[in-house]
Image: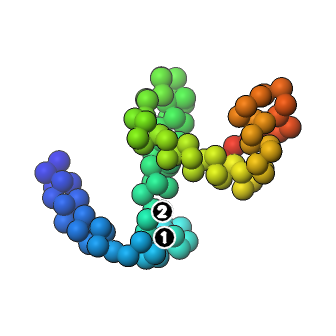
Amino acid sequence: MAGVESALADQRPPVVAAPADRVVSTAGGLPMLLDDFPLTRLLEIAVHSADLALGADIPTPATAPHVFEPILDLLARLAVVRYGQVAVLRALSRAECASAVVAGI
C-alpha cells in the first residue's frame, strides 16, 4: 500500500499543474480532456461494481454522495444526448409517460 500512496503522491503535482484543456489518450486511443478523465473512471468503477454485485448475487455497495452525484449527472447528460430531453424527463419523472427505456450508456 505504501508503494501505491507514493506513486499517487508523485503524480498529484504534475496532474494538478496540467492545464484543464490538456488532451490525454485513453486506453482505447480516444482523445479526452484531462479534466474529464477522472469522472469517466469513477463511472466505470461504479458501473462495474454494480455489475459484479449483480452477477455475484450480493448487494451493490453504496457509493458516497460526493462520488455518486457527478456520476448520476454524467449518465443523465449522456441519456439526453441519446434520447432527448423529453424522453429523459418522462422516464425519470413518470414511468407511465415514458416513451422508451432510457439509459446513459
Residue 73 pos. (x, y %): 57, 47
- Residue 99 shows in the view: yes
Within-10-Å neighbours for mark 2: few <14, some 14–19, many 20+: few
Residue at mark 2: 36
Secondary structure of residue under mark 1: strand
Give the image location of residue 68, x and y in percent.
Answer: 47, 40
* Residue designated by label 1: 33
Circle on res. 67: none
Residue at the spot 48% in from the left edge and 23% down from the top edge: 59
| Residue shown at 31% from the left, 69% from the top | 15
**C-alpha separation, residue under disc 2 versus residue under disc 1:** 5 Å
Please name whichever residue, 67 or 47, is drawn nearer the observer in this view of the structure.
67
Q: Sort mark 1 into few (<14), some (14-19) or many (20+) by Cα contacts within 10 Å.
A: some
Q: Nearer the viewer, residue 3 or 15?
A: 15
Q: Position of residue 43 (x, y in %)?
A: 50, 48
Q: Amino acid at mark 2?
A: Asp
Q: Verify CB contact (< 8 Å) between mark 2 and mark 1.
A: yes
User: What colour scheme does the image use?
Assistant: rainbow
